[in-house]
């Protein structure tokens, strides 16, 4: 499909002044919003087909502007549903305008366009969220730092999507082979660069983008571009450890595995299967000894219980060499991104302290890198891996690594409040009557660490009618309540309060709703609940928890993993709690217990 654009074939503006390029990007950003609005007007049942056809139309217009003689090998949709005239003009305009961008950026823009037009439910099901260029470039840079020789390396993306990483790798390979015959370069890329993708439309679009990127080589050599992408279910392919680099942004979200698949991936599973964990296991199977895995992942992999088996597997088979924590300016990405990191692992490497960086993403294309210190893996590699989210955390982690105790050593265990309230709606009461107990909701734990019996939110009743067989719901002793959901943007991640024994005894027990964690004493607690609450509410432990948790959940598993001082070191702190000392004095004492400067 040719365009009516004023751009002439071969006149792509790669040397435009910076301000003109910025204007072009703004125009394309507006056009992408218009395309998304068009897609949202369609029925979901038609939307994915139309999204593929729209992206193909844009890609064909892009190809015509870049290389008029290029014949693309594939079409991303067998069902060529005709676009209406307005959508067709918009797609062609986007393709022509994208030709004014640097070539790699233009390719990336158009392949990511398809993803942004898909229905949210389908994107979630496929794990199809596009990778911003700033992150794909940095992840390939990490592989560079891992010693990849682009002149010889074999590279695989097992969930290649729009081909962002394959395009970056192809660019590095071309540069490494600069001066060689075009036919030789094409043959080398065809032999050493591979992608797998379950979505045939995404696979076809990324193949088209690679063909456009290599159009000068195919034109000069008279050879066709290799087929880089295999359309398949990666989980069903038998791996062979032949790649120097396995790279990508693997899908994530729960997945239902067959019995055979669950048996195959059992070594990396804990509880339900997550696509990210499965694809990490797959990467280990495709990477040769000494090769590297470069993955964009959710930070929850470092701390969540569901990833404990995966952490053990990585520590054993491919320890981390570097981790970048991604800090993105609000509004940079179209899709909501959960807290993210870039990780580099070495297959058959020796476990040793790994380098931590912070990647500050200013826009989709540009990011600034800050280098921090190194941290090591814990002795129990299935436990959360403490990693500094900011430079000041390095010294804190070093101090925490010397701490011998956990909550269990203090005589406490952590569990979730047992009541799932919407399963017991008929037993909620607005007033205390015979047979009712106080119902403790998350809002009973105030932001300043106090317990206040209250039920403020819609559907939150203050009392619960206990019926026969409900004894398992009753909490009959003093404990520490901790809110289960907080975000990194909040002033505090740990918000705790003592549930006083006087309150429990007065009412003969309470019912705790499951948006609270309960830190419950065993038969012989060595520290008072008030002291435990004060420790959890301290700044030092809050910052330490941020080095553990990579999600909004405050899990029992992560609370039990917090490194704590030995009981003998807590005598002064407990006395200060008993005397109602100021927060500043408590903080000063606890920092000394951790061996930190007060």
Image: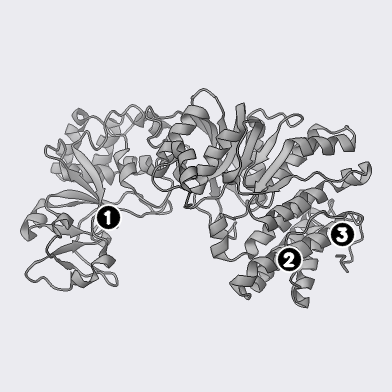
Q: Are marks 1 and 2 in contact (CB under 8 Å)?
A: no
Residue 413 visible in the displayed image: yes
Q: Secondary structure at mark 2?
A: helix
Whole-Å distance between the Cαs marked 1 and 2? 48 Å
Q: Is residue 547 above or below residue 487?
A: above
Pointer 3: what residue? 64
Pointer 1: what residue? 516
Q: Residue at x 43, y 41 (%)?
A: 269
Pointer 2: what residue? 53
Image quarter hosting the N terminus? bottom right
Q: Give the image location of residue 222, x and y in percent.
A: 93, 44
Q: Residue at x 66, y 39 (%)?
A: 156
Q: Give the image location of residue 487, x and y in percent.
A: 41, 53
Characterize the local packing of mark 2: few (<14), some (14-19) or many (20 or more) Cα atoms within 10 angstroms.
many
Q: Is residue 138 left or right of residue 415?
A: right
Going from N to C along the chain, the mark reached first, 3 or 1, is 3
Going from N to C along the chain, the mark reached first, 1 or 2, is 2
Quadrant housing residue 143:
top right
Q: Nearer the viewer, mark 2 or mark 3?
A: 2
Front position in the image: 428 or 362: 428
Whole-Å distance between the Cαs marked 3 and 1? 59 Å
Q: Is residue 462 left or right of residue 543?
A: left
Image quarter hosting the C terminus? top left
Scheme by which the image is coloured: one colour
Whole-Å distance between the Cαs marked 2 and 3? 16 Å
Residue 265 visible in the displayed image: no
Q: Secondary structure at mark 3?
A: helix
Q: Residue at x 61, y 75 (%)?
A: 43
Q: Is residue 480 above or below residue 442?
A: above
Q: Secondary structure at mark 1?
A: strand
Q: Give the image location of residue 262, x and y in percent.
A: 46, 43
């Amino acid at each position: 499909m040719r365009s009516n654009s004023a751009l002439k074939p071969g006149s792509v503006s790669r040397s435009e002044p910076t301000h003109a390029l910025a204007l072009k990007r703004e125009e394309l950003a507006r056009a992408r919003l218009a395309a998304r609005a068009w897609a949202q007007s369609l029925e979901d049942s038609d939307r994915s087909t139309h999204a593929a056809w729209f992206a193909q139309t844009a890609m064909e217009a892009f190809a015509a502007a870049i290389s008029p003689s290029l014949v693309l090998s594939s079409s991303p949709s067998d069902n060529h549903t005709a676009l209406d005239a307005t959508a067709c003009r918009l797609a062609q305009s986007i393709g022509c305008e994208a030709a004014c961008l640097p070539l790699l950026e233009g390719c990336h823009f158009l392949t990511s366009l398809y993803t942004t037009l898909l229905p949210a439910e389908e994107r979630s099901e496929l794990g199809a969220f596009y990778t911003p260029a700033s992150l794909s470039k940095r992840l390939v840079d990490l592989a560079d730092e891992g010693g990849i020789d682009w002149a010889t390396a074999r590279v695989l993306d097992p969930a290649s999507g729009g081909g962002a990483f394959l395009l970056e790798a192809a660019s590095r390979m071309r540069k490494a082979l600069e001066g060689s015959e075009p036919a030789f370069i094409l043959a080398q890329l065809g032999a050493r660069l591979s992608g797998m993708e379950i979505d045939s439309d995404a696979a076809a679009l990324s193949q088209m983008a690679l063909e456009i990127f290599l159009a000068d080589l195919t034109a000069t050599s008279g050879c066709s571009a290799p087929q880089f992408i295999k359309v398949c279910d990666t989980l069903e392919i038998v791996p062979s450890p032949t790649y120097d680099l396995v790279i990508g942004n693997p899908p994530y979200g729960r997945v239902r595995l067959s019995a055979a698949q669950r048996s195959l991936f059992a070594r990396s599973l804990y509880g339900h299967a997550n696509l990210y964990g499965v694809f990490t296991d797959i990467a280990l199977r495709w990477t040769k000894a000494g090769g590297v895995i470069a993955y964009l992942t959710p930070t929850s992999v470092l701390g969540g219980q569901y990833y404990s088996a995966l952490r053990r597997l990585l520590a054993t088979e491919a320890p981390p060499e570097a981790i970048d924590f991604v800090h993105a300016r609000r509004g940079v990405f179209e899709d909501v991104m959960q807290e993210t990191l870039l990780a580099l692992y070495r297959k058959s490497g020796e476990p040793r302290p790994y380098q931590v960086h912070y990647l500050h993403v200013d826009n989709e294309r540009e990011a600034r890198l800050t280098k921090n210190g190194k941290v090591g893996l814990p002795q129990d590699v299935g436990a959360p891996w403490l990693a500094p989210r900011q430079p000041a955390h390095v010294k804190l982690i070093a101090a925490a690594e010397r701490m011998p105790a956990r909550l269990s050593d203090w005589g406490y265990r952590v569990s979730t409040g047992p009541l799932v309230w919407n399963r017991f709606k008929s037993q909620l009461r607005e007033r205390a009557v015979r047979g009712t107990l106080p119902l403790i909701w998350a809002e009973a734990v105030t932001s300043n660490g106090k317990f206040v019996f209250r039920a403020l939110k819609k559907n939150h009743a203050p009392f619960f009618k206990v019926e026969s067989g409900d004894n398992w719901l009753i909490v009959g002793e003093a404990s520490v309540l901790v809110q289960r959901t907080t975000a990194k943007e909040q002033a505090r991640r740990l918000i705790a309060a003592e549930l006083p024994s006087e309150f429990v005894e007065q009412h003969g027990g309470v019912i705790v709703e499951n948006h609270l964690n309960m830190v419950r004493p065993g038969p012989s607690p060595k520290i008072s609940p008030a002291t435990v609450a004060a420790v959890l509410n301290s700044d030092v432990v809050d910052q330490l928890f941020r080095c553990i948790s990579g999600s909004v959940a405050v899990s029992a598993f992560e609370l039990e993993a917090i490194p704590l001082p030995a009981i003998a070191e807590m005598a002064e702190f407990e006395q200060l709690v008993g005397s109602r000392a100021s927060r500043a004095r408590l903080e000063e004492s606890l920092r000394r217990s951790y061996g930190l400067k007060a």
